[in-house]
Image (cartoon, rainbow, N blue to C red):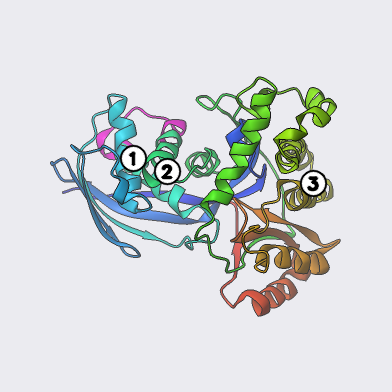
Amino acid sequence: MIKHTFTAPGRVEIGGNHTDHQHGRVLAAAINLETSCEAWANGTDIVNIRDQRFGNETVDLNATAVRPGEAGTTAALLRGVAAWFKQRGYAVGGFDAVVSSNIPVGAGLSSSAAFEVLMGNIFKGLFRLDVSPLDIALAGKYAENVYFGKPCGLMDQAASSFGGLTMIDFRDTQAPVVKPIRADLSGYCLCVVATGGSHADLTPDYAAIPREMSEVANYFGKEYLRDVSRDVFFREIGRARHLGDRAILRASHFFEENERVARQAEALERGRIKDFLSLVVQSGRSSLAYLQNVYSPKYPQEQGLTLALAISERILSGHGAWRVHGGGFAGTILAFATEEKKEEYIRQMSAVFGEDSCHILSIKI
């Protein structure tokens, strides 16, 4: 029995809030927190996972059809990744793995995507599959959409699979353009703040965003907003209002956010850090006002994200940046803080959201 070590990092979304599912651009980074394992081929068609956090799972690779009662489980993710490879003719086999992770669950750092990418890396490494980082990301997205039951885009899996700081253009989701970004963010710390909100019952809120954006795209004769002319959209807003003002506002966010990502990447590469930070703040304000994914309309009294953004603005104005992170509605915000404001920021956010709410991260190159 030869044991092999495999890893997959978590990720942060720096720009491109809810743009990937409309074939837009994102700016994302793999981080120094990861899911890892020791794994070895066992000569069968059975996968045995011993997860130090979630317990044991066993999946028979001869039974890779969707199991509705399995939705939302790690077994569903594993079964879905295996199914993606098998459907494309890859010879995958059984293995045993002992999995551990230091990615906090529910902190918006893509612990599920890291697990999916880890499973893809295991299949690739143990069975010598000729697959790319993109293939592994696509397998993870397929598992999460079809088997786990979450309507996510490709950003989380792609950021974990490719690693580093990247701008990813999803115009062609089967062949996205991944561009590594060179940046010097010394003098700033990267912090994700978990506000303690629950994601329970929020799937309809998440799903409404791509649905409403797609309804706007369909009105203009396209499937995705990326294929709609920005100028035509803004010129025809009045005629499209029957779709609902929120749908129009969310589409407006997409067009501006998609262009903002490209400007963020350019500012980073040219060393214009203050311009980059200003764009991060603009992204967050657009999510708050136009995308409207900072709190659920079902629970208007629960606005942890909005509160975290307000406190961040008071502390970090002129000393960093802040924005909603990931899907929104509950969960986390992302902030950049200068070294001189770092301790004050952590202290005040911890006082409001709990001692373990602030996660200081670094980008994994």
Judged left or right of residue 346, residue 173 is: left
Magenta-highlighted residues: 124-136
Q: Is mark 2 on a helix, strand or loop?
A: helix
Magenta segment, prevailing SS (helix, strand or loop): helix
Residue assigned mark 1 = 80
Inter-mark Cα distance, 2 to 3: 30 Å
Instruction: Tell me if residue 201 is in the magenta stretch.
Output: no
For badge 1, the amino acid type reads Gly
For badge 3, the amino acid type reads Leu
Please say whether residue 56 is visible from this viewpoint. Answer: yes
Judged from this view, the residue extending furthest toward the bottom is 351
Inter-mark Cα distance, 1 to 3: 37 Å
Residue assigned mark 3 = 279
Judged from this view, the residue extending furthest toward the front is 242
Question: Is 62 located above or below residue 340 in the figure?
Answer: above
Residue assigned mark 2 = 144
- State which tag comes first along the sequence, 1 or 2: 1
**Number of callouts in the render?**
3
For badge 2, the amino acid type reads Glu
Q: Please tell me the numbered disc located at residue 181.
A: none
Disc 2 or disc 3, which is closer to the eye? Answer: 2
- State which tag comes first along the sequence, 1 or 3: 1
